Image (cartoon, rainbow, N blue to C red):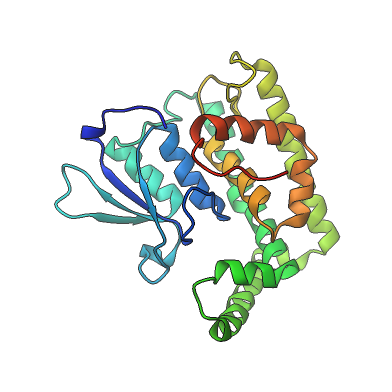
Amino acid sequence: MNAQDTSKQPEVTVFRGWKETGKYVWSPYVVKLETRLRFAGVRYTTDVGGLKAAPRGKIPYIEFRDSSSASPLLLSDSSLIIQNLTERGTLPDLNGRLGPAERSHDMALRALLEDKLSFYHAWERWTRNYYTMRDHALWSIPYPVRVIVGLLVHRNITATLHGQGTGRFTAEEIAAFRLEIWEGLSALLVASRSSSKGGDDEPFWALGGSHPTEADASLFAFVISVLISTASPDSQKVVKSFPILLDYANRIHDRYFPDYEKWTL
C-alpha cells in the first residue's frame, strides 16, 4: 500500500465473511472495497464478521473510527462505504478529475459488472456448481444445518435470478452473454494498455488515464473473483483465454497486493 502519515489515519476493519488472511475472497465486492482502500494507501485490518452483525445484512461491511468519531461506525455495501469514506476525506475522489463523458463511461462499466455480469456469475455458482458454492459460502454453518440453509439460499437466489431475468435464459445463452462482456472488456483493456505511458510492469487503467478510476476497482475485483473461485469453472476458462485480463490483474496485484497469495493459472 502507498505510504501515508499513519498517525492521522482512521482505524478501519473490513469484515469479509471468510476467516482466511493474506488471501483474496470469492466476493468481488469485498475485493473491490479492499482495492479501493489500497489505491488510497489506507491501512486496514480484516475480520470475519457475519450477516447477523452486518448492517443491511450484507458482506462486506466495515467498522470505522477516526478522530471525530466518538464511537465506531458500522458501514455496509461496498459502493456506499466508498461513497461515505470519500465524503469524509478518507478516500480521494477518483472520478473527480473526469469529464462528463468519462464519468458516464466509468458508471456504465461498473453497471455492466455489478448489475449484469454479477447475475451471470451468481447463476453459474449457485445453479451449475451448487455444492461447491454452498460449502464455501456457508462454511461456518455445521454440515447438517448447512444442507437445509443451502436449500433455502438456493431457492431464494433462483427466485431472484428468475425475477431479474437471468434465470429465464438457457445455459448457452448465458454463456454467450458472459463471453460478450469479457470480450468487450478485453478489447477496452488492449486499447488502454497501448495508450498507457507507464512501464511494462506498471498498472494500466480501464479508461486509459494515468490514474485508476472507480471502474478499475470493480473490474479488478471481478477478474480476481473469477480466477480464485472454484465454483466458476466456465468463467475461469473465459477469463484465462484473454491474456490482457491476466496482465491487467497481475500488474495491479503486484503493485497493490504484494502481501496476498496470487491465484494459480
Residue 249, picture quadrant: top right
Pick the front one: 27 or 102: 27
Q: Is residue 230 above or below residue 226?
A: below
Left/right placement of residue 144 relative to residue 22 reads: right
Question: Is residue 99 at least partly visible in the picture?
Answer: yes
Which x, y percent locates residue 88? 27, 39
Q: Residue at x 76, y 33 (%)?
A: 243
Left/right placement of residue 3 relative to residue 184 reads: left
Pick the front one: 217 or 50: 50
Q: Residue at x 31, y 28 (%)?
A: 4
Name the residue furthest right.
Answer: 172
Which x, y percent locates residue 36? 45, 39
Residue 185, picture quadrant: top right
Q: Quadrant of the N terminus?
A: top left
Q: Residue at x 39, y 72 (%)?
A: 52
Left/right placement of residue 40 relative to residue 150 reads: left
Q: Is residue 108 above or below residue 205?
A: below
